[in-house]
Amino acid sequence: MPICLRWRHDRHSGSCWRPIRTHIGEFGVKYLLRSAPVGRQRGCMTSGWSVIVLLSLLSPTLCRGERQSQTCAATESFQRVDSLLKVKQYGKARALLGRLQACHNLSQIEAFNIGWLYGRAHDFRSALRVFRSVHADVPDHLTHEYAIALSEFELGDYESTAKVLSALRSKGLCAAKCSDLLGVAYSKLGLYQDAYPVLAENFQKNPTDSFAYLNLVTFFADTGNFAKAIEIASQAVAAFPQNTEPLMMRGSVNMYQGRLESAHNDFAAAVRLSPRDPDTHFFVALSDYNQDKFADAASELRLAIGSGIVDSDLHYLLAECAIRLDPTKPLDALPELNRAIEIDAKSVSARTLRGKLLLQGGHPREAAADLRLAHEIAPKSRSAIYNLARAYSALGKEEEAKSLFAQLSAKTPDVLSELSERRLKTALNQ
């Protein structure tokens, strides 16, 4: 089944909007080559805009309000917004940007910077409006057009993104980052015959750019050519031995292909490179779990949790291991699920499994509460639908149960399989 390409965001900041200065070469935008990995969504599954380095563009002047005594220090405000974004305080950042935007006499570059910060704050419509309101050559034509294309991409308007970027490319203005986004936009539109030449050319022209490799890995995975995906991923592993991402992607492709031992080796190597990254630990444990090595998986998860890593999916997977290690005591897994939900109240996997266990333990009302929420968060989750239908049936709500059962095929859905599929796709930027 084809995997949907996503353009690469910065892996650690979860951001597509990377530092920018005055031209596209420093824009730093990358494809997101993951899809929903075996478990959780990573980085660019959701769009983020990473740390912006625009302060060097700003003049020290103040913008003045309607009264001369009212001033707003643009530089200080930008610094404050940047600090809020670093700790993911997006609402507060957007509020401050709104006040800053109301200042009179903002320079064009200051206005552009506001648009970029809106993007980092995940308000892409506001970002696009700002970019379209400033002169087409601010800060320069290429960066301006790229910012518009990036905003359109984030809003799911891939056709407009491709139109803007292909026009730049036809003029010889589309640098590496621009080509990356164009290739991904083509892929999102299903135009693989257009995407490949762009990605391949970028790969040839930028042999020292790890993202050029990884975007091709995603492309080949997306089109079902897993042998080629592993070949390019292996080249990336050799070329960038200190980079975790090629290992994670090769491991994910190996897992898709059922080569679990090879996948485990890649994920274990990624743990050694990035011991504080929860994703590396999750995938090592998952590869053990999928080989029925439940004690090894549980040990890996406890080690990661004991080291101070806080991650909902680690606790969820540990609960799955506990059930497999002693199927006679399924409710012993509840403390781990409680902790998973404490960390992430919207964890569909943890809510669904806890609801399932509560239902088995004779608590259908409490189970239904978890399962209803899981279904609301992920209405297409077959495991949430199935278990919620069972809970409704136990509560005597036969019509509601019948309606939900009708949405399912004969195969009984599995919570962990759904989580694994999502996380694998994320690891592949799909």
Image (cartoon, rainbow, N blue to C red):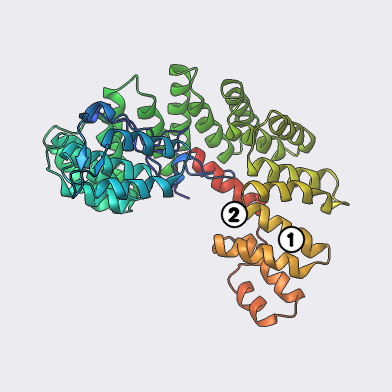
Circle 2 packing at 10 Å, graded few (<14), some (14-19), many (20+), is: some
Across and down, in percent, residue 148 comes to 23, 45
Name the residue at the front extreme: 69
Which residue: 11% across, 35% down? 171
**SS at mark 2?**
loop
**Residue 250 vs residue 90: left or right?**
right
Return the residue nearer the eye: 11 or 265: 11
- Callout 2, which amino acid? Lys
Name the residue at the right extreme: 328
Which residue: 29% across, 52% down? 126
Return the residue nearer the eye: 189 or 63: 63
Q: Which residue is mark 2?
A: 346
**SS at mark 1?**
helix
Query: Which label belongs to residue 356?
Result: 1
Return the residue nearer the eye: 227 or 250: 250
Across and down, in percent, residue 49 comes to 37, 39
- Callout 1, which amino acid? Lys
